[in-house]
Image (cartoon, grey):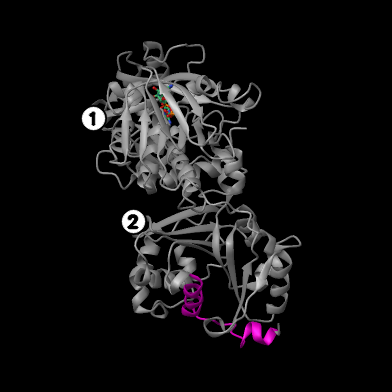
Amino acid sequence: MESEHLYGTASVAASPEDWVKVTARLACDERLHSMTVCDTSFGDGMRFLSLWSFWRSHRAPGAKLQIIAFSSPQSWAALKKGGADDQVPQSLRGLEAQLEAQWPDALPGVHKLSFEGGTVTLTLIFHPLSVALRQMDAIVDVFWLSDSAAFLGEAGGASPAGKLVRVAGARAEVVGLVDNNAQRLQGVLQQSGFEIQGARNAFKGFVRARLRDGLCHTRRSSFVGADVLVVGAGVAGAAIAWGLAQRGHHVQVFDPMLKLSKAGAHAGHFAAAVSPYLSKDDDYRARLSRVGVARAWANWSQLEEPARPIRCGTLGLPTQDRDIASWQEVLWSLGFPNDWAGWLKPEAASQKAGEFLEFGGCYRASGLLVKPNRLLPALLSHPGISCVEETVTEVTRFREGGCGLKTESGSNYEASVVVLANARNIGSLLCRLTEPGDFPKLERLQAVPGQVSYFDAAGFNGGPACVLDASAYWLPQVEGLLTAGGTYDLEQTRAEVTRQGQREIARKLSYFLPAHRQTLSNSDSAVGGWAGWRAVVTGRLPVIGPLYQQHDIWLATAYGSRGLTWAALAADLIGAKLNDEPAIVERELSAALLPR
Ligand SMILES: Cc1cc2nc3c(=O)[nH]c(=O)nc-3n(C[C@H](O)[C@H](O)[C@H](O)COP(=O)(O)OP(=O)(O)OC[C@H]3O[C@@H](n4cnc5c(N)ncnc54)[C@H](O)[C@@H]3O)c2cc1C
């Protein structure tokens, strides 16, 4: 074909509406049905806003619009820099305000924004183009290559278009602009398995290519809306059940502890902290914890009081392991925005915390206070969830597809998907599903009991205003009680509240709460506590992923001391895979969590 015929007239400066027109033509019947669009250059966001606006007036019932967009980490102010507000058409201003309200911190990683009750999502990948192409996990229907020079130049490796093929759905389309690179772009796309399409009518001025039949490497999930059985109603199980029920799955949750209450093992667990962890090299745990905190807030801030978390911020204090100099080195080497994580001198830190602090600390505004005994019942009360107050004794996979489980009373249940979220007891169910040596990571799973202490807030001037995190944590009051924790009782075989543990916690608090030393030295200063278990594997990352390629049995365990940070994250990881949503973390991060 002649390139003239392919490209039509040059249109280096296509408007957002032109992109929308082209995309609408690619959707069936010229209407936007459920589709995933990948914009390899988010720019000023106008293409996204225009497509969203078009979709609102043309959507089919139940339709979903999923946009993935690449950008460098940037603040809203940076995004808007240079563009006058009056350049945004009046019709898009309302949507723009919604986008601004959810715009994430300028931090590297994947950020999921959700609009219109979750039917429109924007997954921002804040990475250079080459990294974003390598790390994204999705099934894409339409790729927008608005900056072909960047795509051809920076995508790295011999075949940038090959990276599109990895995530392309069947008959996926690529649209790019007719510019000086058009000829080269066409060649690269053809080499990687795309067929160049004619560019008449709406496509005038665009390069258009379609993935050849038979070349699709992605596989759509067969579990959209499927029934799911979740074993365990602790932090992991409750969050996953809710995340799946929100996506339209009917979920049955099994846990004998539900006989006591819907808070199960966390009845009496009044408060816990969810804080982003920082490491000098921004390791996997640090990156995942950022997403975990963001997902916890995005998901659970929708809940009613008192289940809603409180965004009170976290102040990390110097400890033996991390003194002031190493805190500051961490902050300096990360170079993250100061308003996301910044060092506060003693006076400012004391003011922020509402406690006298001698040494200052690192403040992260995104830190959350979570109330497990309120959160879990609220999650499990979702109308899409039913609870079974029994221990699961056996899990089976059927040869003809589907899974089943048996409970202690001998009852059998069947569904398409099973999630094992029963923490340290996971081995007893896995032994019939796997061979010894198959999952060495899980064979080394350890269980460490520990306790938190409660103090009467009245005796501590009401307690701190934010999470204080040092050798122990000290949390803002919940229902008149202050929570401090925790102990790691490595030698113990039972999880119980002991006097010795309470003394240990009081001693740790005394190090950084000089104003309360006197009160804490009283052996009766604690008025109660809660004890539980932490399941841990080497590396202290959680284990979240499918047991088999078929994605019918999932594991979510080894949450260690950060269960509430991983809980919503796991729900979104599993929910995304079962429902063909763009992944909420980079490929390398989800690979690090796999059971193997
Ligand atoms: C003292 C202490 C303080 C902590 N503080 C924090 C904190 O501040 N922030 C934070 O993020 N994390 C904290 N954690 C960690 C957090 O509590 C755990 O990471 C989290 O509870 C793990 O969730 P889970 O669902 O995997 O396990 P669990 O919450 O222990 O739940 C597992 C559930 O599985 C059920 N079960 C087991 N076997 C079966 C079976 N065969 N059939 C059916 N059900 C079964 C159990 O009854 C249990 O209810 C703390 C932990 C402790 C011990």
The answer to whether residue 518 is visible is: no
Q: Position of residue 313 (x, y in %)?
A: 39, 43
Query: Which quadrant holds the N terminus?
Result: bottom right
**Quick check: 245 above or below 214?**
above
The alpha-carbon separation of the residues under discs 1 and 2 comes to 35 Å
Magenta segment, which residues?
Answer: 3-27
Identify the disc placed on residue 480: 1
Q: Nearer the viewer, residue 340 or 555?
A: 555
Element class at badge 1: loop
Indicate yes or no whether the magenta region holds residue 19: yes
Q: Amino acid at mark 1?
A: Gly
Q: Quadrant of residue 522?
A: top left
Query: Hey, what amino acid is under mark 2?
Result: Gly
Q: Is residue 546 above or below residue 120?
A: above
Residue 151 relative to residue 311: left or right: right
Which image quarter is the C terminus in? top right
Q: Is mark 1 within 8 Å of ligand 1?
A: no
> Can residue 543 be found in the magenta stretch?
no
Q: From the top left corner, tell me how far across and down residue 586 is, in percent.
A: 58, 49
Q: Which residue is mark 2?
A: 117
Q: Say which label, 1 or 2, has the lower sequence index.
A: 2
Residue sitting at 26 percent across and 31 percent down? 461
Q: Among all residues in the image, which is located at the extreme front?
A: 400
Badge 2 element: helix
Point 45% across, 18% down: residue: 449
